[in-house]
Amino acid sequence: MADSNMLAQEGNIEMGPDVSKVRYISLIRLEGGESILNLPYASMTVDPDLIAGFVTAVIIFAKTPIRTIRKAAYDILIEVGETVLVLLVADPVTDEKPYRKKLKEILELVEEKHGAKLEKFEGDVRRFREFALTILKEFPYDRPDISMVPYKKKGKTIPFRVGTTDKALEKIENFINGKRTVSEIMDLIDLSDDEVIALLSALEKYGWIGYKRRMSETDILVTE
């Protein structure tokens, strides 16, 4: 199984914020307060939808320029754009900067890609599901040890497996054969390292892959 707090240093993958602290990410349309995309990362004692509703009321309707809300058990980090806000719920963090940097990048990308749709919103949030991959590139569910070998399992439905995200997942699944390491897949596939990590994290999150260590010449097989 991949170490959720570790990303091997080889492969020139930049270490970002500690994704193990992330609990929930949501995109909320500013004009109407609708949540257009939610990504749960870990279980919470408080319903994250209630948190999103609270933030919507405070930021959008009360027009309060708050960017951080601190609770005893978690922090809520907020970035606001022209048409949408992005919020991140995380375990208390000492340094917000790496998280905010990623949130601002997500905000810029969603408004660049979906700004016109958000301004003329008709209530259909399905069109925004494939943007989950963009979020996962910044905040993957997990960062695997790239020396590990992913293998396929039978998982459950990935709610954002649509459009370009579905095609990318299918592409990486074709490279998972139970023999190649994550590093080798990165070298072979025509996707960025960030995309590979994001896609593998989604497949593991929803039970479609596991990880094993590659056998070496020094390993000893013990039989009874």
Image (cartoon, rainbow, N blue to C red):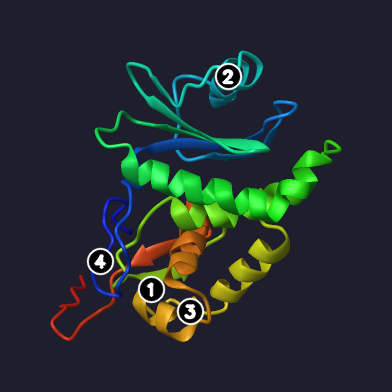
**Mark 1: which secondary structure?**
helix
Residue linked to disc 4:
8
Residues under numbered marks 1 and 2 in contact, where contact means CB atoms less than 8 Å apart: no
Residue linked to disc 1:
182
Dot in front, 2 or 3: 2
Of label 4 and label 2, which has the lower sequence position?
4
Residue linked to disc 2:
50
Kindly identify the residue that appears in the image at 26 percent across and 56 percent down: 6
Query: Alpha carbon of mark 4 to alpha carbon of mark 1: how far?
Result: 10 Å
Of label 2 and label 3, which has the lower sequence position?
2
Q: Residues within 10 Å of mark 2 (few under 14, many from 20)?
A: few
Q: Above or below — where is 38 with respect to 193? A: above
**Mark 3: which secondary structure?**
loop
Q: From the viewer's side, name the closer residue of 68 and 76.
A: 68
Q: From the viewer's side, name the closer residue of 32 and 51.
A: 32
Amino acid type at circle 3 is Asn
Residues under numbered marks 3 and 4 in contact, where contact means CB atoms less than 8 Å apart: no
Which image quadrant for residue 95?
Answer: top left
